[in-house]
Amino acid sequence: MKRSRRNHSAAFKAKVALAAIRGDKTLSELAAHFEVHPNQITQWKGVLLERVASVFETGAAPAPDAAGTIKALHAKIGQLAVENDFLEGALNKTGLWSAKR
């Protein structure tokens, strides 16, 4: 029976890659213990070693998706400010705004 595709979390991948780097167990032992293919462990280990320097970088730019989120939030703030101004003007015309203050 064929196994369905599994999606591993980043924390799991890091745990497996660190275990591979430690070298306490062989690749075959790690594969049996974590129930993943040895080639997958080798790949995760390589990715970890490539990106390990970024952990110690300072002043790193925000992630690309964070920039998009910030733009979306600024747009929402602008929209809400326009709506508030419009509603304040409408309440002033009806005389209800001055009664609330």
Image (cartoon, rainbow, N blue to C red):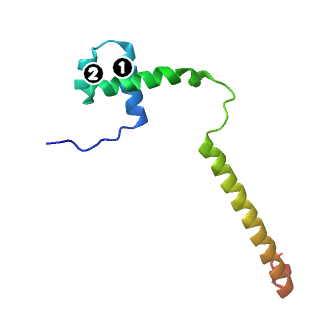
Q: Residue furthest left?
A: 1
User: What's the residue at 78%, 69% (across, down)?
Assistant: 82
* Left or right of 37 in this view: 49: right
Q: Splitting the image into 4 quarters, where does residue 59 fall?
A: top right
- Residue 60 in picture, x, y percent from top left: 66, 30
Tell me the element at label 2.
helix
Q: Nearer the viewer, residue 44 or 11?
A: 44
The three-letter code of the residue at mark 2 reads Leu
- Residue 39 in picture, x, y percent from top left: 31, 25
Asked if 75 appears above or below 22 in the picture, the reply is below
Q: Disc number at residue 30?
A: 2
Residue located beneath label 1 in the image: 19
- Residue 45 in picture, x, y percent from top left: 40, 22
Q: Are marks 1 and 2 in contact (CB under 8 Å)?
A: yes
User: What's the residue at 39%, 16% (across, down)?
Assistant: 21
Asked if 86 appears above or below 93 in the picture, the reply is above
What is the distance, in whole Å, between disc 1 and disc 2 at their CAs? 8 Å
Q: Residue furthest top?
A: 24
User: What's the residue at 81%, 84% (across, down)?
Assistant: 96
* Left or right of 13 in this view: 73: right
Q: Splitting the image into 4 quarters, where does residue 56 fall?
A: top right
The three-letter code of the residue at mark 1 reads Ala
Asked if 60 appears above or below 100 in the picture, the reply is above
Quarter of the image where the C terminus is located: bottom right
User: What's the residue at 62%, 45% (across, down)?
Assistant: 66
Tell me the element at label 1.
helix
Q: Nearer the viewer, residue 88 or 18?
A: 18
